[in-house]
Image: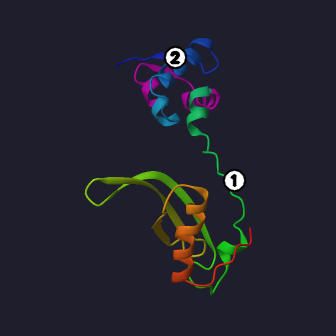
Amino acid sequence: MGHPVLLPQKHHVSKLITQHYHSRGHNGVACTAANVREKYWILGVHRLAKTVKYRCVTCKVLARKAESQVMASLPKERLAPFTPPFFYTSCDYFGPLQVKVGRNKVTKHCGVIFTCLNTRAVHLELSVDCSTMGVFAGPQAIFCNKRTTCTNTG
């Protein structure tokens, strides 16, 4: 363009023009100033573009930092050095699962996940049944016999 329109920085129209060009893409200060200069010559357009960007609510929302997760400290069992695997163990039950026994018989079983609290290793077992006695008798006895002596401290 040969002769752009000359406007002062503190004029209301200058502010509206700069806001218009900024709101088209919420670009940075230099990009907004360059877009304004294609048609208009505003004295101090860089400073005006900086003010418009600073006051833009959308830019403030997009530029804010993500929230950080507040983490609790790990229990002492998770940080125990030189302990054998599955010395500290947690377990979780899932199911019921339908298991086919033989050709025609289908029975319900629960699955048990044992997790080592120190190494995060996983061991899966299938419980005899989903009753309370089956859940406590079956897989824990099998798991304890494979590893070490188990005690119930809870």
Quarter in which the C terminus is drawn: bottom right
Residue sitting at the far top: 13
Q: Is residue 54 magenta?
A: yes
Q: Which color mode does the image show?
A: rainbow
Distance between the Cα atoms at labels 2 and 1? 44 Å
Instruction: Give how far across and how far down residue 89 sits, in percent.
Output: 61, 72
Query: Which residue is disc 1 drawn over?
Result: 70
Could you say which is closer to the camera, residue 127 or residue 68? Answer: 127
Which is more N-terminal, label 1 or label 2?
A: 2
Residue drawn at (57%, 55%), measured in percent from left and top? 131
In the image, 89: left or right of 154? left
User: Helix, strand or loop at disc 1?
Assistant: loop
In the image, 72: left or right of 86? right
Q: Is residue 52 magenta?
A: yes
**Overall secondary structure of the magenta stretch?**
helix
Residue drawn at (64%, 75%), measured in percent from left and top? 88
Image-quadrant location for residue 148: bottom right
Could you say which is closer to the camera, residue 21 or residue 99? Answer: 99
The magenta stretch is 34-55
User: Looking at the image, can residue 115 be seen?
Assistant: no
Residue drawn at (61%, 33%), measured in percent from left and top? 60
Residue 74 against residue 79 in the figure, above or below: above
Query: Which residue is disc 2 drawn over?
Result: 17
User: Looking at the image, can residue 35 be seen?
Assistant: yes
Instruction: Give how far across and how far down residue 102 sits, in percent.
Output: 28, 61
Residue drawn at (62%, 87%), measured in percent from left and top? 82
Residue 119 against residue 124 in the figure, above or below: below
